[in-house]
Image (cartoon, rainbow, N blue to C red):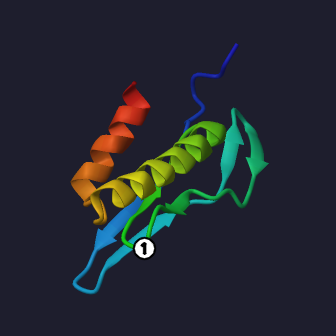
Amino acid sequence: MENENIMKTGTTTVGIMCKEGVILAADRRATSGNLISDKKAQKIYQINDDMALTTAGVVSDVQLLVKLIKAELSLKEIRTERKPNVKESVNLLAGLVYS
């Protein structure tokens, strides 16, 4: 039986937009219930020269999504001969997540 008084916490990520760019930060701990499975987990991924993302959730799912979105954006850039913008990239990622 799980103790109802235990406070559960999740991953913390933050993004700050500045004049000179964007700052992304995330905690590094990966947990599985009460077990700390990794104290140095990667939660910030660079997608291309202009985009990055922060993550929370199942690591294997995140790694696959990062790999897929990088490939999809590279293909889109080759086909259209221009870099996809953020809105297009988000729509592609949403399609991968919700399909």
Task: Determine the residue positioned at 66% across, 54% down.
Answer: 29
Q: Nearer the viewer, residue 71 or 1?
A: 71
**Residue 43 shows up from this direction:** yes
The quarter of the image holding the N terminus is top right
**Residue 11 shows up from this direction:** no
Farthest bottom residue in view: 20
Task: Determine the residue positioned at 42% across, 73% down.
Answer: 49
Q: Nearer the viewer, residue 77 or 34?
A: 77
Residue 67 placement, left or right of 51: right
Residue 86 placement, left or right of 95: left
Q: Residue 41: x, y in percent? A: 68, 56
* Snapshot quadrant of residue 96: top left
In the rendered view, would you say 55 is above or below 27?
A: above
Q: Residue 95: x, y in percent? A: 35, 33
Q: What type is the residue that disc 1 sits on?
A: Asp
Numbered disc 1: secondary structure:
loop
Q: Residue 97: x, y in percent? A: 42, 33
The quarter of the image holding the C terminus is top left
Q: Nearer the viewer, residue 36 or 74?
A: 74
Mark 1, residue position: 49
Task: Determine the residue positioned at 75% across, 52% down.
Answer: 38
Task: Determine the residue positioned at 67% across, 48% down.
Answer: 30
